[in-house]
Amino acid sequence: MFEERSGPVKVKIPGRGLSSVTAKLHDSKIEIFQNEKLLKSLPISPSTSIDIDRSNLCSISIHNRSDELEMYASDNEETMEWLYALKSATYYHPSVSMDSFKLLAVIGRGYYGKVMLAQKKDSGELFAIKSIQKKKLVETNKVSTVISERNVLTQAIHPFIVKLRYAFQTASKFYLVIEYAPGGELFFHMQIRDIIPQKEAKLYCAEIALALDYLHSKGIVYRDLKPENILLDSNGFIKLTDFGLAKDLSVIKCTKTLCGTQEYLSPELIMRQPYSFEIDWWALGVVMYEMIFGYGPFYRENFNEMFRRIIEDPVSFPSNTDRKLISLIFGLLTKDPSKRYKFREIKSSPFFADLNWDDVYCMNVKPPFIPKIKNPTMPTYFDREFTMEQPADSIVTPLVGSVSDISDFSFDSKELISPVDVHFSPQ
């Protein structure tokens, strides 16, 4: 189901101008009340246009073929919550399964399952479907990771985080149907190009920083920032993906679980000290260094030596490195997490002096690199090791018991499943 929502907003009423009212979204329609009197009812369907005005980020326009409504929320966050609730209503579908999709290609694979490019049969929309085998999750005591990923994605509403469209399950697998980013992994491009030009890396870093700051504001620590989990959409904007290691720290404030990928682990994580959101900023520093210089700041094939360097050695730079870049990366790769750069310091860094952060957030800064997508149904920026495989939803052993059907996971739950895209009205 889509998310039902109600609350105070403002709308334009003929003859009265902008008026305070109560909006209620339910039963595939939005109703406007004033003093408990129904003023307007507008049906929401797949053909309904839901847009946000770039010149006024608190304004949402709702257009049907014969009617329209202009609605104003109190702030940007409230606007985004209304926007996605409305968009989810346009995408609501009561029943989704693998039979709803045509499988086009394998675009990723891991121990627990694979990711496939798929096309929705009734709409032609493209998605990435992540299938995860329940048996392997149970064997490694990792069922919580897919539940965590699903829960984070239903909450995460941000331009630089992949959108979850559907979540469903069978007795043998979990399925996450997410936004397809045809530009592939940043890791793929770093392998092909060796280094990412500084101007391009700067924009990626800013977009990632905005996404991390958003997650942290929701109490979520990502814990798995690396080039493999940074995707590029068709316009060259980044999308963070894979939230299986994400953890909610809104209550416990810190944790000690050792997890993540070795090259991107912070000193406090390696030393098994309590850690918090600061580990994500460290990982951003490592990713940025790796993008610009083509190698990691502390990398060694021997993990023990690499961990020693992460804990003890200062980061070094080539002799001709931009001083503003050095200052930023030094701040991100500060050993002491209490002194490490956070979003406030990143945003005010001289390295970003020529970037308007509002423009970055609104996707008004054109990426220097835009993927060349000739045929959207044929993946270009993905490893041929995967794309040469025959796409199929393989048959695996079903489970019995509590894990065979987790009701809160499935698409039929009442939690919001975020839509695929957001459209901004031109100024």
Image (spheres, rainbow, N blue to C red):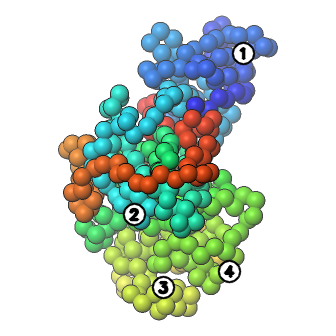
Q: Quadrant of the N terminus?
A: top right
For the point 43% across and 20% down, which residue is it? 47
The residue singled out by tag 1 in the image is 33
| Res. 49 mark | none
The residue singled out by tag 2 in the image is 110
Query: Given this view, does label 4 or label 2 mark the residue nearer the observer?
Result: 2
Find the distance from the CA under tag 2 to the CA under tag 1.
50 Å
Helix, strand or loop at label 2? It is: loop
Helix, strand or loop at label 4? It is: loop
For the point 44% across and 44% down, which residue is it? 177
Find the distance from the CA under tag 4 to the CA under tag 2.
29 Å
Circle 3 packing at 10 Å, graded few (<14), some (14-19), many (20+), is some
- Amino acid at circle 4: Gln
- Amino acid at circle 2: Gly
Residue 361 picture location, percent across and down:
50, 48
Query: Given this view, does label 3 or label 2 mark the residue nearer the observer?
Result: 2
Query: Given this view, does label 4 or label 3 mark the residue nearer the observer?
Result: 4
Asked if marks 4 and 2 touch (Cβ < 8 Å), the reply is: no
The residue singled out by tag 4 in the image is 273
Of the image marks 4 and 3, the number of the one nearer the N terminus? 4
For the point 63% across and 58% down, which residue is it? 220
Residue 414 picture location, percent across and down:
63, 35
Residue 283 picture location, percent across and down:
51, 71
Residue 78 picture location, percent across and down:
65, 37
Find the distance from the CA under tag 4 to the CA under tag 1.
53 Å
| Res. 315 mark | 3
Helix, strand or loop at label 3? It is: loop
Of the image marks 1 and 3, the number of the one nearer the N terminus? 1
Q: Is residue 331 visible?
A: no
Find the distance from the CA under tag 4 to the CA under tag 3.
21 Å
Of the image marks 2 and 1, the number of the one nearer the N terminus? 1
Circle 1 packing at 10 Å, graded few (<14), some (14-19), many (20+), is some
